[in-house]
Amino acid sequence: PKSTFKSETSWAITPVITVQNDDFDDLWPAMVVAIETASFIALDTELGGFGNRKSLLAQSIEDRYKAICHAARTRSILSLGIACYKKLDNKAADTYLVQVYNLTLLCSEEYMIEPQSVQFLVQHGFDFNKQYAHGIPYCGGNNKGGSDYHGVHIRALFTELLRARKPLVFHNGLIDMVFLYKVPIYFVSLYQIDLSDMFPLPFTAFYLEYAYKKWKCLSKTEAGTCPFGPQSPEN
């Protein structure tokens, strides 16, 4: 199923396609086409926990990064959402064709899961029974898994994302990327270099929200009177 998203003036409901282990192979060709033809791609994860939440808010980016790496080594991704936005040039301005896939994942390694995260996910409709019965198996890190699994596996999905080199949009970009990357690089500067080589123009939803509001404000007021001011958003 496909749907159209139009900014500002009108909205169309976009269906979310659930992808599980039993239908991953069947849906794979459509997912590849959606990724290859997208103008940009939005990614979001649901996680089994974050570890020490106080450490995730550390003032030092190095300390924050190390805390996220520790959480990524001991927790898992439970589901991955991918939304592919394709700008339609023959339509009204800012009209997009949007295809959304929600992949239910099941880590094949031992991992921790936090009661607080379970409670939050259950309250928002996450079905753990379906995850354990039909989740797509995956292993984190480099050169793991896939050898005894017949069919498409999650590593192929990230290969397609790397090959497509589309701009990516995240909600909690640093956390999501560390969990997806899951390779033991212990310095955030080296991690940034790796990401910049792999993906062009990664944005977080917080920055995009700030930029959109500021643009909207400036388009309606005289320069310099926008209440958002010249400062950069906190992230």
Image: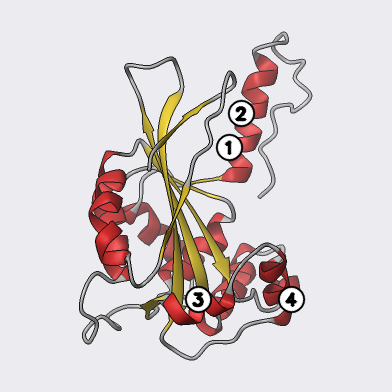
Q: Amino acid at mark 1?
A: Leu
Residue at image location 33% in from the left, 71% down from the top: 22
Quarter in which the N terminus is drawn: top left
The secondary structure type at the circle numbered 2 is: helix
Q: CB of mark 2 within 8 Å of CB of mark 4?
A: no
Label 3 and label 4: CA atoms lie apart by 18 Å
Task: Judge whether 66 appears above or below 46 on screen.
Answer: below
**Res 231 label:** none
Q: Earlier in the sequence, mark 3 or mark 2?
A: 3
Using the image as rendered, state which of residue 106 and residue 19 is in the foreground: 19
**Residue holding disc 2:** 212
Across and down, in percent, residue 142 comes to 31, 78
Q: Nearer the viewer, mark 3 or mark 4?
A: 3
Q: Nearer the viewer, mark 2 or mark 4?
A: 4
Across and down, in percent, residue 41 comes to 41, 45
Q: Amino acid at mark 3?
A: Gln
Using the image as rendered, state which of residue 140 and residue 85 is in the foreground: 85
Q: Amino acid at mark 2?
A: Tyr
The secondary structure type at the circle numbered 1 is: helix
Q: CB of mark 1 within 8 Å of CB of mark 2?
A: yes
Q: Nearer the viewer, mark 3 or mark 1?
A: 3
**Residue holding disc 4:** 116
The secondary structure type at the circle numbered 4 is: helix
**Residue holding disc 1:** 208
The secondary structure type at the circle numbered 3 is: helix
- Disc 2 residue crowd, few under 14, some 14–19, many 20+, Cα 10 Å: few
Label 4 and label 1: CA atoms lie apart by 29 Å
